[in-house]
Amino acid sequence: MHKILIVEDEEDILDLIKFTLNDYKVFTFTSTNSVQKLLDKEEIDLIIMDRNLPGTEGSIFIQTLRDKGYNQPVIYLTAKDKEEDILQGFGRGADDYITKPFSLEELKVRVKAVIKRTKKELKIIKHRDIIFNLDTREVKIDDYLIDLTHLEKDLLLEFIKNANKVMTREILLENVWKDSFDKQVKTVNVAVKRLKEKIDPFNEKQYIKTIRGEGYMFC
């Protein structure tokens, strides 16, 4: 079951949308306060975001998420219906844009279409300026091809999939090394060090941070 996160400050509209999208697992919020925490815990397939929110402009919040590496597809569902608003919305990460008042049936169709389209597009994963092609397993940073070993690519992919989460060395051993006989903590340390040297040789971008006593975090 696909998971949808909805941010809408009008609770009656929120309830209507949730009822309409009963084929999905839906998480609802009336503000953006706890959205990032949920994104860190759940594999969300789509965000439906109002733009007129108390204390926050929804599209600016989405742009902030994008800058942090969150790449979930977004539908703006909003009363901002001028042409410049719509263009601005697409410039701030929209995969689709629906203006209020809206048709619930049309919303269902558009939600289905965006999820179907973006799921196909997930053959390429992007995090900040890193592009990982899942078909060719090529890794590019700033359009430059990065020469990584098979293991380093597996390790990078595991970090990208768990961005902004603390990954212990034990979890990395289990998920990346799997059935390998070389499953030692020091092996992880060496591999992470090599990966950091290749993707961030001058330590300017600080993709991978060491969390003392716990493990690593891919930021």
Image: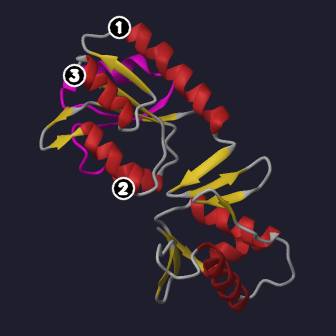
- The residue at which mark 1 appears reads as 103
Which residue does the image show at 59% across and 81% down from the upper left? 201
Asked which secondary structure carries label 3, the reply is: loop
Give residue 87's position: percent from left, percent from top: 33, 26
Which residue does the image show at 24% across and 20% down from the upper left? 13
Looking at marks 2 and 3 on the same chain, the residue that comes earlier in the sequence is marked by 2
Circles 2 and 3, Cβ within 8 Å, touching? The answer is no
Q: Is residue 134 visible?
A: yes
Q: Is residue 118 a member of the stretch shown in magenta?
A: no
Q: Is 195 above or below relative to 22?
A: below
Which residue does the image show at 73% across and 49% down from the upper left? 134
Graded by Cα atoms within 10 Å as few (under 14), some (14 to 19) or many (20 or more), the crowding at tag 2 reads few
The residues bearing labels 2 and 3 have C-alpha atoms spaced at a distance of 27 Å
| Residue 37 badge | 2
Which amino acid, by three-letter code, is at mark 3?
Answer: Lys
Specify the farthest residue to the left: 55
Determine whether, in the image, residue 142 is placed left or right of residue 182.
Answer: left
Residue range corresponding to the magenta coloring: 5-34
